[in-house]
Amino acid sequence: MHLSAVEQSEVVMAVVQIQMSKAKQLTGFALFNLGFRPFFLGAGVFAMLSIASWLGIYHLPGLVEISHISPSQWHAHEMLYGYGMAVVSGFLLTAVKNWTGVQTLHGKPLLGLFALWCVARVLFLFGTNLLAWAAIADLLFGFLLILAIATPIIKAKQWPQLAVISKVLLLWVGNIVFYLGSFGLLDGGMLYAINGVLFVFVSLILMIGRRVIPFFIERGVAHLVTEKIQLRQYKWLDISILMVFLALFLNEIFVHVAGISSWLALALFALNGYRLYNWHTPALWRVPLVWSLYVASWLINLGFLIYGLQTQLGIAAVLMLHLFTIGGIGLMTLSMMSRVALGHSGRDIKALSPWMKLAFALIVLSAVFRIVLPLLMISHYPTWIMISGVCWIMGFALFLLVYTPILCKPRVDGTYG
């Protein structure tokens, strides 16, 4: 087929316009193109700021005025409802777009949602003098986040995905309970909110991890093995873990039947351990984005073991909680953010920066100094907390060093997102 001179000219002009548009997109500012960008960047910055503030408060009491709640409750709230919610927001605003094919928040609406999260975090960093304003910003942020991720799911009529919405709704309700407790309107509200949200985060990791970690392992090691790997999955196992976890959650938060939680936690350790055994392949240890997820999964599982043996071994509850939070949630979220940011910016997920291997190792070290060393030498407890905090800060500093340009620059393929 031959084109006329006019048609040839039009084709050339179209190609030039596409190339110019792509070049413009590649050199633009893309931080608010998709949810993972601002919230992963915010999570990385806040992970450092919040722990640095906590180290100062822990070693220099009175550095920041905290009233109505204890300093440890302040710290727990900001790491779970602050850092944790940022990671959840970035992940779900991105994942829901993929699941439904419906565009999630971007541009100015995304900027507005992110600004609310930032306002709440900044107000909390200065203690509790502005607690009422922090509560307004925080709860409004949570409500708008639920709307932002529920709307595309409802439009696409993907009703099974509403299970994810239910978890985010629980996080929001937990935050309401925390603020009610902090203002003296609900006895024990802070304790319910912190313990409850820890369970919700662990359940989110178990649920989403069941969906993606086996897939990531199979894909991640495919180039390292000669035969195709297909990890074993069992529906009875998934249902058993869900039911036992739900029973543990209900007993710990609402029922409080003595002794049952220990047996439920040990059952979870056995069931989840069998699942992780089925997910193992030797090649995964050669892929940092895979072994980090796998180690984080095992650290959460070890948390179930310590939970079950806590009374018999006389282990302080705070050490068990940090096994879940630093070793499990911290390492899992850092690894997930690293992978998602590469994949959704159009980059090769196999091209992980060598610095991230060190970042993952530093988070593992943070868990070791916060949990293992106090068990061995409790007399140096303040020192272990300081070293653990420094390892955490260094790990996230490396994340920001590597990923700030990736999160701010457009996709390398020139498409929007």
Image (spheres, rainbow, N blue to C red):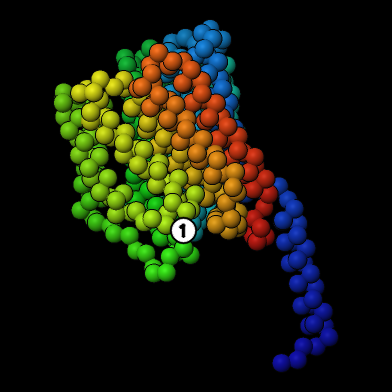
Residue bearing the label numbered 1: 220
Instruction: Assign the C terminus to one quadrant of the image.
Output: bottom right
Percent across and percent down for residue 229 are 37, 64
Say if 66 sits above or below 150 in the image: above
Q: Amino acid at mark 1?
A: Gly
Question: Which quadrant of the structure image shows residue 252?
Answer: top left
Instruction: Give the total number of marks visible in the rendering.
Output: 1
Q: As drawn, is 46 to the left or to the right of 29? A: left
Q: Secondary structure at mark 1?
A: helix
Question: How crowded is the residue under tag 1: few (<14 C-alpha within 10 Å), some, or many (20+)?
Answer: many
Instruction: Compare residues 82 and 212 and report the one nearer the observer.
Output: 212
Percent across and percent down for residue 330 are 46, 36
Instruction: Compare residues 57 and 417 and report the one nearer the observer.
Output: 57
Percent across and percent down for residue 380 are 44, 15
What residue is at 39 percent from the left and 68 percent from the top? 228
Which residue is most to the bottom?
Answer: 1
Question: Which quadrant of the structure image shows residue 326?
Answer: top left
What residue is at 64 percent from the left and 40 percent from the top? 401
Say if 150 sits above or below 397 in the image: below
What residue is at 54 percent from the left and 39 percent from the top? 359
Instruction: Assign the N terminus to one quadrant of the image.
Output: bottom right
Say if 251 sits above or below 166 in the image: above
Q: As drawn, is 125 to the left or to the right of 257? A: right
Which residue is most to the front?
Answer: 376
Whether residue 368 is visible here, answered yes or no, is yes
Whether residue 95 is visible here, answered yes or no, is no
What residue is at 25 percent from the left and 49 percent from the top? 274
Q: As drawn, is 212 to the left or to the right of 246? A: right
Which residue is most to the top?
Answer: 62
